[in-house]
Amino acid sequence: MTTPKLAIGLDIGGTKIAGAVVDDDGGVLAELVEPTPEESDAAAVCAVLLDLIERFRAEHEVHSIGVGAAGIVEWPAGRMLWAPNNSYRDWPIREQLEKLTGLPVVADNDANVAAYAEARLGHRDSGNDREAPYANMALVTVGTGIGGGLVLDGRIYRGPTGLAAELGHMVLNPDGPECGCGNHGCFEAYASGTALTRMGREAASDDPDGLIARLGAEQGEVTGHTVVTAVQQGDPTGRALFARLGRWLGVGIASLANIFEVQAVVVGGGLVETGELLLEPARVAAREYAFAPTARGVTPVVPATFGGDAGKIGAALLALEHAQP
Amino acid sequence: MTTPKLAIGLDIGGTKIAGAVVDDDGGVLAELVEPTPEESDAAAVCAVLLDLIERFRAEHEVHSIGVGAAGIVEWPAGRMLWAPNNSYRDWPIREQLEKLTGLPVVADNDANVAAYAEARLGHRDSGNDREAPYANMALVTVGTGIGGGLVLDGRIYRGPTGLAAELGHMVLNPDGPECGCGNHGCFEAYASGTALTRMGREAASDDPDGLIARLGAEQGEVTGHTVVTAVQQGDPTGRALFARLGRWLGVGIASLANIFEVQAVVVGGGLVETGELLLEPARVAAREYAFAPTARGVTPVVPATFGGDAGKIGAALLALEHAQP
């Protein structure tokens, strides 16, 4: 009897814990999701994980388990040192789950495993074909902040702490707007949801009779969502703000592409759901700031394939590749 | 009889070919240098390399040969595809040298092997102790342009072409001055010898009676060297320009450190010979723009240990580690 090549991928977030049974091609055979327990210490979170694992194993024979989680995860030890939204600290999750399940386990940072999923199995720019994995790829997730991960020379770049690449704190202009981190002009300060909120508020203050200001008054405050709504209603100011946001996204993407000569920059996160509104100006700027485009070509800017599923799929793929029975 | 752990390191530049016999601790037992032949095709350069190798082998028993060269070198194949200043193209140097010498050979980009030497054996910030190698380190070489290399997770980052990291074309301000590459606001456009020349010319034009303008008139034109001379003569304008250059260097260093959480940024290249004049403002800015300095500390900015010898030493170290007899 051969072990089928299936793994359980688990993605531990601040509000939910998502799981899937995944095959070696990234195909999802089963999915489950549970809320993150309010008391999010190791014992409570572990109980949820074990419940999910048991339910999956009742239906599928799996080779291994992969866990992705926000925060600092020691690789390859699989110890969760710290999480931004959960209360567990210094939790040897890999060791504990291996003991309790009898299966080999890997654990890594959620952005790392998401980048891994996109590099291994994300759609190619050329269309929907699944071709060779990207050996060199950056994932830029545009949400409240800018996060992401790097796959370099075929490997996840983890850095000294395992926290993955802090792409959002690349400096795009030292005299730029203040970033949440306290610096000025970070990528995140220019091209995130927070930046869109800031730009929307400036626009509302500049034009108190404009659509953004009026929508903001209805909603109680102007946020990035207000700007998206304004654009959906055909507001030219909103479109101009998106063009500016997309342009800065493209400048950051070009900078990453210039440094690493990545084969693609994959854009994920909530804001990529606005599609070409964001990606088109990003592509224009990425081309404008590309280094030696004649010799090297221009790095493609592509939307993420797996969206919110990238974490659990990437965790399972990593388990299939690295977990040692 | 055991083979002594010695390798020959060869650094092929546009004007000279430098060689050394190096031990596993980076110690140099012998050195030779020859001009690069005017007709710098594969045959002519190979003849010089073989002559150096023969002279070294007459005195030392070596384990292997490492070659570093500017341009695009395919790793691990060791094929030199292209060089900026030499005329050889698509030259299978590794294969050819292995056949002609009977020794195992590795060949890599010169910035890659220089970064490797600094990461493996460069002095530590704490003093002159040789401690553990840096697993994560950026080498930034400040000369006419900005070059460098990255060692990430203990490995040289080579990227898809082997050309190494193009650190000089990170974007530090999309509205900044034009770079030699045609873009605007690259790291190189702000913090290189070329940038110093540009700033010196602006200063001379703003103050035609100032020392920089007068020295420039004597020398025929204002260059970065003119600014260095002015500083040596106590010129406050020259000092201010260095402070600005160093500040931009620090911003770029901070950006690299933020992305990668490198353990050190090592600064090499001709301009680092100005010492603290450049490094002090760079350290201040690197601290100012550091991400989460309280949690992560501030990445040390240290001058390169091996200077112009880093290429041949790094090539030899790489051979000792990777060349397969």
Image (cartoon, coloured by chain):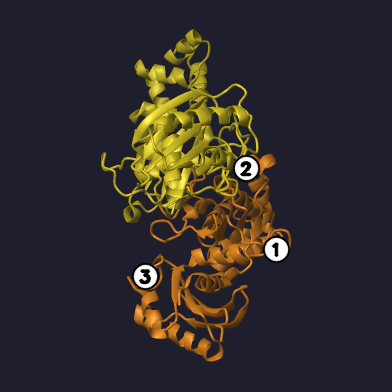
Chain colours: A yellow, B orange
Label placed on residue B79: 3
Residue furthest right in the image: B127
Classify mark 2: residues with Cα within 10 Å, few (<14), some (14-19) or many (20+): many
Element on which disc 2 rests: loop
Residue A291, x across and y down, in percent: 40, 51
Q: Quadrant of the C terminus of chain B?
A: bottom left
Real-space Cα distance between discs 2 and 1? 32 Å
Chain ID at mark 3:
B
Q: Secondary structure at mark 3?
A: strand
Mark 2 vs mark 1: in front: 2
Q: Which residue is mark 1?
A: B233
**Can residue A255 be seen from the camera position used here?**
no
Q: Position of residue A106 (x, y in %)?
A: 51, 43
**Type of residue at label 1?**
Gln
Quadrant, the N terminus of chain B:
bottom right
Left/right of residue A59 with respect to residue A44 in the rendered view: left
Q: Secondary structure at mark 1?
A: loop
Identify the mark at residue A17; answer none if there is no mark. none
| Residue positioned most to the top | A218
* Residue B296 x/y as whole percent: 66, 43
Tell me which residue sits at (45%, 38%) in the image.
A140
The residue at the far front in this view is A1
The chain holding disc 1 is: B
Q: Are marks 2 and 1 on the same chain?
A: yes
Asked if badge 3 and badge 2 are on a common chain, one would say yes
Q: Which residue is mark 2?
A: B289
Same chain? Circles 3 and 1: yes
> Looking at the picture, how far across and down is residue A196, in whole percent?
48, 26
Picture layout, residue A116 above or below residue B55: above
Residue at point 40% right, 41% down?
Answer: A117
